[in-house]
Image (spheres, rainbow, N blue to C red):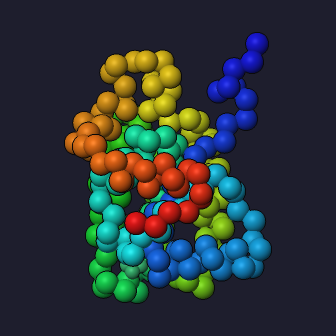
Amino acid sequence: MSNETETVFEPQIVAFCCHYCAFAAADLAGSMRLQYPPNVKIVKIPCTGRIDVIHLLKAFEQGADGVYVAGCLEGNCHYLEGNLFAKKRVQHLKKLLDEIGVGGNRLEMYNMSAAMGQRFAEVATEMTERVRGLGPSPVHRRQAAGNPESPDDAVARVSGASENPGERAELADAGERNTVEV
Ligand code: FES
């Protein structure tokens, strides 16, 4: 008997990439024709300091199995300390995801320079393999089961469950186009 979750699981990964470094590294990886999994959908941001916990939670709420933030190398943020703020937010949210049953390992922070095309490809592969090993996000497993006490509800509660159609559309778009800019 076929069951979708028992076939090969291809995780959906959302990568919030800083314009100056990780996004440029992704471009370089493309120019170098480096292979990395197509599971990664890139959201281009001006600086990782722009990322708020709510953006990361929304990505999970809207179907991501894994999320990562990729910023400039520490000490090289174009806005001075944006990547350090992002690091703190990611560390905080990892603990919260563990507490609500989603799993902190589904979230990560990376740093790279614009010249690190190879590193970009490695990170995309590493996160895809990690999340493939973890399996589908409990958020969609519970959604599919219609469990009202799901981590999805917890994510929605934590994120304030605010409805921002523009933000939702951007993240949904990322799934369609692989890249979106915020
Ligand atoms: Fe790249 Fe701040 S400008 S992380």
* Quarter of the displayed picture in which ligand 1 can be seen: bottom left
Left or right, 24 with respect to 18, comes to right
Is residue 76 placed above or below 178 in the rendered structure? Answer: below
Q: Number of marks in the image? A: 0
Residue appearing at x 66%, y 58% in the figure: 125
Residue appearing at x 63%, y 77% in the figure: 27
Image x and y of residue 164, in percent: 30, 48
Is residue 109 placed above or below 62 in the rendered structure? Answer: below
Quadrant location of the N terminus? top right
Left or right, 165 with respect to 180, comes to left
Residue appearing at x 55%, y 83% in the figure: 114
Left or right, 182 with respect to 99, comes to right
Residue appearing at x 58%, y 46% in the figure: 12
Quadrant location of the C terminus? bottom left
- What is the quadrant of residue 36 in the picture? bottom right
Is residue 19 placed above or below 127 in the rendered structure? Answer: below
- What is the quadrant of residue 155 in the picture? top left
Residue toward you, 54 or 112? 54
Image x and y of residue 154, in percent: 30, 33
Mark yes or no: residue 148 visible.
yes
Image x and y of residue 62, in percent: 44, 42
Image x and y of residue 95, in percent: 32, 47
The single residue placed furthest to the left in the displayed view is 160
Mark yes or no: residue 105 visible.
no
Left or right, 10 with respect to 89, comes to right
